[in-house]
Image: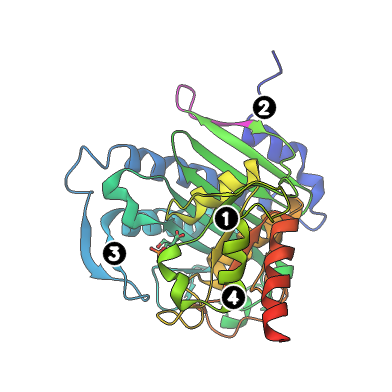
């Protein structure tokens, strides 16, 4: 039986991966792990404690009805970042503006974190897996000052850490520091994340495509042609792919990371820029995808190269197995060049 390696041990063992860190980043990753355990605990009891389940009654910046767990998760992560002292500011799906922490300790923090505290939260009431997505950057503004908007609007190529927590049949934390992707499963009996998926690699091709096909008549022809290709025997595997759409990005992404597949959320009439947010959904998962051998594109350009202009900027999103993302881009280009 292989030795049990906890997340803590793994972080310390790999601290040399990021030369400029002198322990702060390790502490920040540990803070994220603790906050994830708290959120996992709250989610696991959501069905039992009626004061949690259901809508909070407010709306977030996206105009989406806030579930109580959204708000609780957002507060839990913000507290962890503010109290840890490694982070000078954050941006989150649940907050219209970025938050620059005010304490002297936080103003000396080296990092900013952009995160979606609970993506897919509309699935909470129907007991479908949901997730947290996070992205860590080195601050650009001078240490000792408050964080600035420029700290938040960095291209995805500048990420130093990206990760997600999947609250599924088990709770998993998957992250990269730019040296591959590793997955940890929470063992509730000891309260530790344990290394369960070392050096994760996304299969070059898979037979699963994840898209809300209710949008099929609203998307561009190149994409609808690609979906027909997936459903035919003309595709790269010679067998029709299976449509698998959970409606929860982290769950769909994680399945494709393990089995191979593609997740698609295009620009459609009802969402002309796409639905997913660049900074705290698309960029972190794009970093992980590329580190695992996959790709992430708008259908025309690499996600990580985009220079962000707004905190809650949306982009069309194609992410997953390399050969599948390349193929849909060929379909889109072919239609454009007709
Ligand atoms: P639709 C959840 O709100 C989310 O951001 C992703 O987790 C999910 O993949 C997508 O939106 C679902 O959107 O329009 O298909 O319901």
Residue 5 disc label? 2
Q: Residues within 10 Å of mark 4 (few under 14, many from 20)?
A: many
Q: In percent of the image, x 33 and y 37: which residue is there? A: 44
Q: In percent of the image, x 49 and y 48: which residue is there? A: 251
Residue identified by numbered label 1 = 231
Going from N to C along the chain, the mark reached first, 2 or 4, is 2
The question of residue 191 being in magenta is answered with yes
CB of mark 1 within 8 Å of CB of mark 4? no
| Picture quadrant of ligand 1 | bottom left
Question: Real-space Cα distance between discs 3 and 2?
Answer: 37 Å
Residue identified by numbered label 4 = 152
Task: Please name which of the two marks, 4 or 3, marks the residue nearer to the observer.
Answer: 3
Residue 87 seen in the figure: no
State which region is magenta.
188-195
Q: From this view, report whether residue 223 is shown above or below residue 10.
A: below
Q: Nearer the viewer, residue 203 or 66?
A: 203
Q: Position of residue 310 (x, y in %)?
A: 54, 83
Question: Real-space Cα distance between discs 1 and 2?
Answer: 42 Å
Q: Position of residue 288 (x, y in %)?
A: 68, 54
CB of mark 3 within 8 Å of CB of mark 1? no
Question: Real-space Cα distance between discs 4 and 3?
Answer: 23 Å
Q: Nearer the viewer, residue 252 or 200?
A: 252
Residue 66 disc label? 3
Q: Residues within 10 Å of mark 3 (few under 14, many from 20)?
A: many
């Amino acid at each position: 039986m292989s030795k049990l390696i906890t997340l803590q041990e793994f972080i310390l063992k790999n601290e040399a991966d990021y030369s400029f860190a002198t322990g702060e980043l390790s502490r920040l990753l540990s803070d994220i792990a603790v906050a994830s355990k708290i959120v996992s605990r709250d989610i696991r009891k959501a069905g039992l404690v009626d004061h949690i389940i259901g809508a909070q009654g407010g709306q977030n910046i996206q105009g989406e009805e806030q579930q109580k767990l959204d708000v609780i998760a957002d507060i839990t992560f913000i507290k962890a970042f503010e109290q840890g002292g490694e982070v000078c500011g954050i941006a989150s799906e649940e907050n219209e503006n970025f938050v620059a922490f005010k304490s002297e300790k936080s103003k000396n923090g080296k990092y900013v974190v952009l995160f979606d505290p609970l993506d897919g939260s509309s699935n909470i009431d129907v007991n479908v897996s949901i997730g947290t997505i996070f992205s860590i950057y080195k601050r650009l503004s001078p240490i000792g000052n408050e964080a600035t908007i420029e700290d938040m609007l960095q291209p995805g190529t500048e990420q130093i850490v990206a990760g997600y927590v999947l609250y599924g049949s088990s709770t998993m934390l998957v992250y990269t520091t730019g040296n591959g992707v590793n997955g940890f499963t929470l063992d509730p009996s000891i309260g530790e994340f344990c290394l369960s998926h070392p050096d994760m690699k996304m299969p070059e091709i898979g037979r699963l495509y994840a898209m809300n096909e209710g949008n099929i008549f609203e998307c561009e022809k190149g994409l609808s042609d690609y979906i027909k290709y997936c459903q035919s025997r003309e595709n790269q595997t010679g067998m029709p792919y299976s449509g698998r759409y959970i409606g929860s990005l982290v769950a769909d992404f994680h399945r494709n990371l393990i089995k191979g597949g593609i997740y698609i959320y295009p620009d459609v009439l009802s969402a002309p820029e796409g639905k997913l947010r660049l900074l705290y959904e698309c960029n972190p998962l794009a970093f992980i995808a590329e580190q695992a051998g996959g790709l992430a594109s708008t259908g025309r350009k690499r996600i990580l190269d985009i220079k962000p202009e707004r905190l809650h900027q949306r982009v069309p999103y194609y992410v997953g197995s390399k050969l599948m993302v390349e193929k849909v881009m060929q379909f889109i280009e072919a239609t454009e060049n007709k």
